[in-house]
């Protein structure tokens, strides 16, 4: 069953077409990775799905046109983590993550016990319980990125969009965050779309990859089909070695080209 469908997606910035007719589908419970060099269109695709940029083409969520959905309906269907989340510095971690429950609370309503329980569970799973009452302005960059993920997870939307979710994290927290997302995907049939710079992480966690170049889809398929020496050399201008890790996983290792 298709959770998200993109057809002929086009976006212009200041008269320049930055997405030039993008097509892909994401199956329910799948994890699609968007990879490609800087400026290839990864973040713009995520913004188009969220409806924060003007886009031509068709975006369907569970076979329903996103244009027919209200902002609150879209918020109940899609949660997102921005690459550089804008956090209110005086708010506590707990209250910020609690904002993720907003789409589930009526206009004049207040959060209930079940909403508070969701927040506590999310903070515990992200190992952020000790930071619950710290102001956001006191957090490190990595902690801030984890808290932004916490808010998105508290939203309990069936589709999760991640824009470089590990860019500010050390290698241990990168693994922790991505494995948590993968666990939730298995538990809740969560559908994930993530933009990732780290091609090895993309290969290890994503079912399928869409490789972008200059606003076009250059390759799509399983990670080991998309992450080839030729594709990476052609789009990134990089010399790499592809190492088979077993179980179908691969690692992308840069190779020196000079002495």
Image (spheres, rainbow, N blue to C red):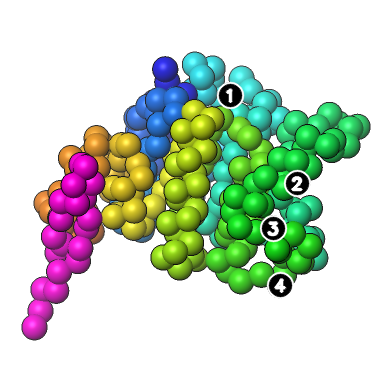
Comparing 206 with 163, the one in front is 206
Calculate the distance from the C-alpha at mark 4 to the C-alpha at mark 2.
18 Å
Are the residues tagged 3 and 1 within 8 Å (C-beta)? Answer: no
Mark closest to the chain's N terminus, 4 or 3: 3
Q: Is residue 188 left or right of residue 40?
A: right
Which residues are drawn in magenta?
238-259
Residue behind mark 3: 129
* Residue 29 location (% of width, % of height): 44, 29
Mark closest to the chain's N terminus, 2 or 3: 2
* Local secondary structure at mark 3: helix
Query: Farthest residue toward the left?
Result: 259
Instruction: Let me know if residue 181 appears in the view.
Output: yes
Residue behind mark 4: 138
Residue behind mark 1: 67
* Image height of 20 relative to 14, above or below: above
Residue behind mark 2: 98
């Amino acid at each position: 069953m298709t959770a998200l469908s993109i057809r002929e997606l086009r976006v212009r910035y200041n008269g320049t077409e930055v997405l030039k007719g993008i097509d892909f589908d994401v199956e329910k419970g799948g994890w699609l990775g968007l990879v490609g060099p800087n400026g290839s269109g990864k973040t713009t695709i995520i913004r188009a799905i969220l409806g924060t940029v003007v886009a031509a083409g068709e975006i369907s969520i569970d076979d329903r046109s996103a244009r027919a959905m209200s902002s609150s309906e879209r918020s109940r269907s899609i949660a997102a983590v921005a690459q550089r989340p804008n956090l209110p510095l005086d708010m506590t971690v707990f209250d910020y993550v609690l904002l993720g429950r907003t789409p589930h609370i009526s206009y004049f309503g207040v959060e209930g016990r079940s909403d508070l329980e969701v927040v506590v569970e999310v903070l515990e799973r992200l190992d952020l319980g000790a930071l619950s009452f710290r102001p956001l302005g006191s957090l490190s960059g990595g902690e801030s990125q984890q808290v932004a993920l916490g808010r998105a997870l508290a939203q309990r939307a069936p589709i999760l969009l991640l824009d470089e979710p590990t860019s500010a994290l050390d290698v241990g927290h990168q693994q922790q965050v991505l494995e948590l997302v993968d666990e939730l995907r298995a538990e809740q049939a969560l559908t994930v779309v993530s933009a990732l710079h780290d091609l090895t992480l993309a290969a290890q966690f994503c079912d399928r990859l869409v490789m972008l170049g200059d606003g076009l889809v250059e390759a799509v398929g399983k990670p080991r089909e998309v992450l080839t020496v030729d594709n990476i050399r052609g789009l990134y201008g990089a010399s790499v070695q592809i190492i088979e890790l077993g179980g179908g996983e691969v690692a992308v290792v840069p190779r020196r080209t000079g002495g």
